[in-house]
Image (tube, rainbow, N blue to C red):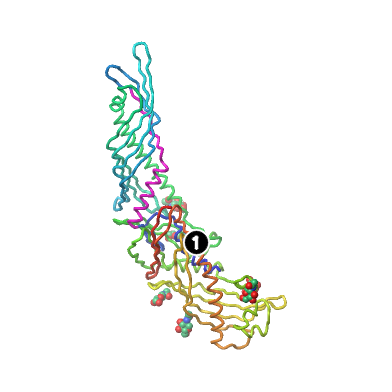
Amino acid sequence: MILTKVITSLALFVLSISPSLAQAKDGGHVSLLVSETGLDLAKDFLIHKVISTTLPLQLPEIEKKVKIPLIGKVQMGLTNIKIYAVDVRSSRVETGGDGIVLSVSGATADVSMDWSYAYKASFFHIADHGVASVKVKGMDLRTTVSLVGENGSLKIASRHSDCKVKSIGIHINGGASWLYQGVVDAFEKKIITTVEETVSNKILEKMKKLDAKLQSLPKEGKIDDNVAVNLTFTGSPVLDDSSVEVGINGLFMANGDGGKKVSGSISPFLTPRVKRMVGISIEEEVFNSATLVYFIAKRMHVDIQETKNGSALSTSDWKLILPELYKQYPNVRMMLNMTVTSPPAVNITKNGIDAIIDLEISIDVQNSGAVLSVARISVVLDVGGTAEIAANNLAGSLRLKGFNATMTWSKLGDLQANYIQDVVSTILESLFLPYVNTRLMRGFPLPFTHGFKIKNTEIVYVENGVMVCSDVAFG
Ligand SMILES: *[C@@H]1O[C@H](CO)[C@@H](O)[C@H](O)[C@H]1NC(C)=O
Ligand SMILES: *[C@@H]1O[C@H](CO)[C@@H](O)[C@H](O)[C@H]1NC(C)=O
Ligand SMILES: *[C@@H]1O[C@H](CO)[C@@H](O)[C@H](O)[C@H]1NC(C)=O
Ligand SMILES: *[C@@H]1O[C@H](CO)[C@@H](O)[C@H](O)[C@H]1NC(C)=O
Ligand SMILES: *[C@@H]1O[C@H](CO)[C@@H](O)[C@H](O)[C@H]1NC(C)=O
Ligand SMILES: *[C@@H]1O[C@H](CO)[C@@H](O)[C@H](O)[C@H]1NC(C)=O
């Protein structure tokens, strides 16, 4: 049962590495490549996210003594200044030597505010207040961040943000006839610089939060009580002119107790060009570290005591397949225990995933209360594996390509070799693989799904590894 879990969790863990970050792979066994279209989506997502979590954005109040012709000195103030809407029509993301540059051009924003003024005329104190709105036009924003790997984490090494506003249009509700020109003359420039500074600072603040989030990413992904995956970032992100790639160690390891370290040699792993938004490359070593860790944790074991319909497995079910068994132990409960006896070796080529599994099958019966072993068969299976994405789940399956079976021990007398083959074939095809595949096909939810949908997934097998290429979409 665990055998299957191993394979499924492989993919699971891979995708559970925090998505949307990219990096290099010196020493990494898993790499995540975000392509141009992926960066574009990430950019749109980021802009949407920043806007939705920032608005309404409060700006500092502005107060000033203003000289108004014919009236004299007027104390004017703008309070409760808020950007409540932003419209981004054009934006782009670039990668290169400086880092990742996100720029927005010609955005507009809507600002609401309260105006008030007060002055002394003859013996009266005159004051008034009301509301106004401001349309911010031609807002350009340029944000640059550089990402580096440090001590197994990703951090933002430098960040810059620059906001420029071309013009604003002020609309005032109510007030005296001189008010409009007074506000424009006295406050227009100040409103522009306030918007520019507040927006820049807000973006920097968001980057700081993002940095803290990056650095607090767990270095280990717990899969269950026994098994975890090393999520340590290896090196700094590699940026080219259209993509970002990050590497993580990616190997499976025993959870807790600093258990057995699995070391794998690092093979050169060619990343094919990705036409989808993201490409996750998983080296063969990752699969092998998984099988090793699960093997060491004694988790590659299947006991079958029931038929598919839930009734107890009986020697009578196997009357035709194993007549000798039925003859000696008619109508008693039987058990099939299957144990993997060495860590399965996974080999990935352009044609797919292959694994060799050493399996020991033990046939037991319930004999007057006691469990009695009646036969043991050693099997070497050659299986082919496929991975697939179903909805937002990663699933997979195994198929039998061939096997060799040897009876190592038996109470059933000498059985012919081809007869053993038939029995084992039945066990593998009707019990072992369906059992494993039922679990594999159920799949695991992918952590990408946080606000995203995975679509158009393509699995590409390459020499020594697998690439999962996928598009993602909002909602
Ligand atoms: C690197 O991480 C380890 C463990 O998390 C910590 O003990 C060490 O101080 C860190 N080194 C630097 C340079 O941050
Ligand atoms: C996790 O991966 C990092 C980077 O490859 C490595 O330095 C570290 O020893 C690994 N940790 C374990 C427990 O294997
Ligand atoms: C369950 O399957 C066994 C054979 O596999 C059969 O003998 C038994 O009648 C079935 N029970 C039910 C409830 O279908
Ligand atoms: C097979 O599994 C059953 C149920 O888990 C157990 O009682 C029995 O001892 C096992 N037999 C062997 C040979 O491990
Ligand atoms: C993997 O399979 C290829 C092709 O079948 C073979 O040449 C290679 O030796 C295998 N590698 C391992 C580690 O089994
Ligand atoms: C089974 O044995 C044959 C002959 O020794 C060998 O060619 C084949 O590779 C073996 N198959 C498996 C799955 O071990």
**Residue 290 location in percent, x, y?**
49, 66
Whether residue 441 is situated above or below residue 171 in the rendered picture:
below
Residue 188 location, quadrant: top left
Q: Nearer the viewer, residue 298 or 41?
A: 41
Asked whether mark 1 lies closer than 8 Å to ligand 2, one says no
**Residue 266 location in percent, x, y?**
39, 66
Quadrant location of the N terminus in the rendered image = bottom right
Read off the residue under disc 1: 444
Most common SS among magenta residues = helix
**Residue 316 location in percent, x, y?**
65, 80
Badge 1: residue crowd in 10 Å (few <14, some 14–19, many ≥20): many
Residue 409 location, quadrant: bottom right
Q: Nearer the viewer, residue 73 or 138?
A: 138
* Residue located at (29% from left, 44% from top): 105
Whether residue 132 is situated above or below residue 278 in the rendered picture:
above
Residue closest to the far right: 368
Tell me the amino acid under the disc marked 1.
Answer: Phe
Mark 1: secondary structure: strand
**Residue 390 location in percent, x, y?**
46, 63
* Residue located at (58% from left, 83% from top): 408
- Magenta span: 35-64
Magenta-colored stretch includes residue 308: no
* Residue located at (40% from left, 57% from top): 472
